[in-house]
Image (tube, rainbow, N blue to C red):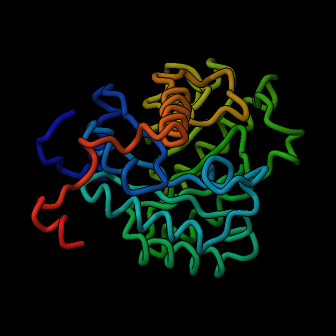
Amino acid sequence: MSDLKKKKLTIVQLIQKKADKQKVTMVTAYDYSAAILAEKAGIDTILVGDSLGMVVLGYESTAPVTMNEMIYHGKIVRRGAPSTFLIVDMPFMSYQVSISNAIANAGRIMKQTECECVKIEGGTEMVPVINAIVKAGIPVCFHIGLTPQTATKLSGFKVQGKDAGSAKELIRAAKEAEDAGACMVVIECVPDIVGKRITQEVSIPTIGIGAGKECDGQVLVYHDLLGLFDRFTPKFVKRYADLGTIAYEALSAYKREVEAGIFPGAEYSFKMNHEEEKNI
């Protein structure tokens, strides 16, 4: 891990990384310690994703996550990673009701979390919302392909853009989002050729998650890449560590030692002066 103080990237610099063919790194984070580690590792961007609903809060989907929950976790991550470009998800129904509602909620997230950008999901129907939020002075990252907030409408967590028609629709959504002012596009769970074509068609960075290696960058969920969440593992997830097993074994060992009277031993206990002991 690097101990050098990191300089926060700007939107302009992230776009320049695409132009220079330098990959952008992104990871989710939901708490202070995870944010510290991501920043020390030099990750370019941190996403406080509404995936926290499933991996932190125990919901069955991302849909129940509230504005207050997103802001709470966003503020925590900001404290842990003050020098990293921070994106915070706008939760389900915080931007779909009306444009004025979307602007107000985006502004609330920006002000209270001090993030650099908000993220919304959808297709071409969200272009007016993107345009309005951006015109209000709030940067927007757009999420297309498999959109977890509306996974039920998409018949579950399935690959999107598998036929030419739906692929073209995703390309159109990305291009229109860029025209509306979006500064970045997350592309989830599409064939690699679709991720490549979208990346070629837009001048803003594309961040893939199950969208192939030709995207301008990649994002993974913190708990997935570290092996901390095993309810299900998508095909596109690579586990870089198995911390879940390590944590389980450590907790089991702790339980055994406490029950056997081994922990805490003398090395983990405090002693009193012998003369003082006599006076107890």
Quick one: which residue is furthest to the front in this view? 278
Image check: 237 left or right of 145? left
Q: In this view, does 10 lie above or below 213?
A: below
* Residue 93 on image: x %, y %: 74, 68
Residue at image x 32%, y 57%?
80
Q: In which quarter of the image is the C terminus?
A: bottom left
Residue at image x 88%, y 48%?
153
Is 201 or 189 nearer to us in this picture?
189
Residue at image x 30%, y 51%?
84
Is 141 or 232 nearer to us in this picture?
232
Is 233 or 280 nearer to us in this picture?
280
Image check: 171 left or right of 37? right
Q: Using the rendered view, name the quadrant where residue 237 is placed.
A: top right
Q: Is residue 264 above or below residue 126?
A: above
* Residue 238 on image: x %, y %: 54, 21
Q: Is residue 229 above or below residue 140?
A: above
What count of labels does the image hold? 0
Q: Can residue 219 be seen in this view?
A: no
* Residue 194 on image: x %, y %: 65, 24
Is 35 or 151 nearer to us in this picture?
35
Q: Quadrant of the N terminus?
A: top left
Q: Using the rendered view, name the quadrant where residue 151 is placed.
A: top right
Q: Can residue 239 be seen in this view?
A: yes
Image check: 268 left or right of 111? left
Residue at image x 68%, y 71%?
94
* Residue 22 on image: x %, y %: 31, 27
Q: Using the rendered view, name the quadrant where residue 42 is placed.
A: top left
